[in-house]
Amino acid sequence: MDLCELSPSYVRSIAPYQPGKPISELAREMGLDEKRIVKLASNENPRGIGPRTRAAIEAALADLARYPDGNGFELKQAISRRYGVDPSGIVLGNGSNDVLELVSLAFLGPGRSAVYSQHAFAVYPLATQARGARAIVVPAKDYGHDVEAMAAAVTEDTQVVWVANPNNPTGTMVPPERLETFVKRLPERVIVVIDEAYNEYLHADLRADTLKWLKRHPNLVVTRTFSKAYGLAGLRVGYALAHPSVADVMNRVRQPFNVNSIALTAAAAALDDMEFVARSYAENLQGLRQLEAGVRALGLDWIPSYGNFLTIRAGRAADVYKRLLRRGVIVRPVGGGYELPAHLRVTVGTAEENERFLAALAASLKE
Ligand SMILES: Cc1ncc(COP(=O)(O)O)c(C=O)c1O
């Protein structure tokens, strides 16, 4: 008997999430020195973490024998102070991935549907399918979310609409006014998730006022993360901002201690380090321009990006990906579920890492 058969068919047919290849794995496979490998595959922050956050982490080590604060009081207070939201409308997660899962646990199930865009972040199909809900995938326009078509695609049984702004892996964004018109158009019975994992990489003028919209739209859920501009991907911490009754139902399906104590302390410290985030933003912009110039010089096209990564049209991308691996450079192929078989996504690294990538890309294209 195949024990797989015991799980519901909608679970069995899930295509597993493909993470960026770990450095240690490539080193083992190719016999390469880990220190010579450049990983630009998971949209992490090349700055690492700031000294204040490091100090908070060191202080938190003293209390590791105890369970964390299951309600994350201090971190919620810090978020509440920063954004002027009530702590009752905050849901903390083990990465923002976790809060996306909580949305699906709280609102999706068989007989319900969720709307998202073609090329949208991979967790939306996963979280939708894992609950047995039906996916309504709306074709992208110029690689980006066609929000007008997404609103039109909502049906009687639609419970959730997923929007990544900016989106990964395309780096596209929906301008604030257009996004607000879209939110207004959706019926109040539909939860609309605006996933702002890359919000800090947007120029201030391009950031939507989503936290203000929360007051007018109780069906809105805004998700944010400490994994990107705050540099804490390895600790796993993110959050959702929502109407208190939406947050309440999400909290009911949350594991009691879903965010560990070091992550809670580090995130609160990182949130206060505005200078670190400002530098991350500025360096990312420089890195993007460096990558664009290098890619242009190689005669390749890319999708204009508002995130900390660039998605490049590289012809036979799967082959180029393998050739880059042999040169010790890990990027992300975005064929498969993302339906971008001719593209590769590269994370903005340090100036030196970007240079290594561009040199390896030039050599791989000639091969
Ligand atoms: C659009 C988007 N949302 C959410 C996430 C989840 O990140 P995390 O779980 O680290 O917060 C990612 C990670 O790459 C992302 O690209």
Image (cartoon, rainbow, N blue to C red):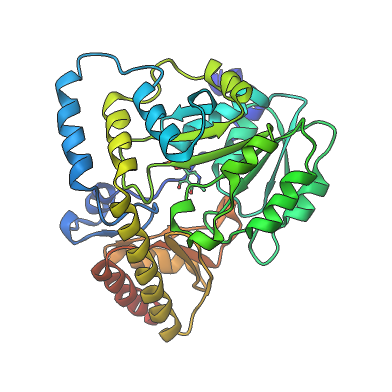
Q: How many marks?
A: 0
* Residue 7 visible at all: no
Visible in this render: residue 347? yes
- In this view of the protein, which residue sits in the foreground, 232 or 221? 221
Within the image, what quadrant is residue 178 found in?
bottom right
Is residue 143 placed above or below 89 in the rendered structure? Answer: below
Q: Is residue 287 above or below residue 173?
A: below
Residue 125 placement (x, y as % from top left):
62, 40
Relative horizontal placement of residue 178, taking residue 5 as reference (left or right): right
Quarter of the picture holding the C terminus: bottom left
* Rendered location of residue 88, percent (x, y): 52, 22
213 or 142: nearer the viewer: 213
Relative to 340, 276 lies left or right:
left
Q: Is residue 243 above or below residue 290?
A: above
Quadrant of the rendered structure where residue 5 is? top right
Quadrant of the snapshot with the N terminus: top right
121 to the left or right of 80: right
Residue 337 screen position, x and y as percent: 59, 50
Q: Looking at the picture, does residue 145 appear above or below residue 366?
A: above
Q: Residue furthest right?
A: 156
Give the residue displayed 69% in from the left and 36% down from the top. 217
**Residue 309 placement (x, y as % from top left):** 43, 62
Q: Nearer the viewer, residue 95 or 24?
A: 95
Residue at (43%, 41%) from the top-left corner? 225
228 or 277, which is in the foreground?
Answer: 277
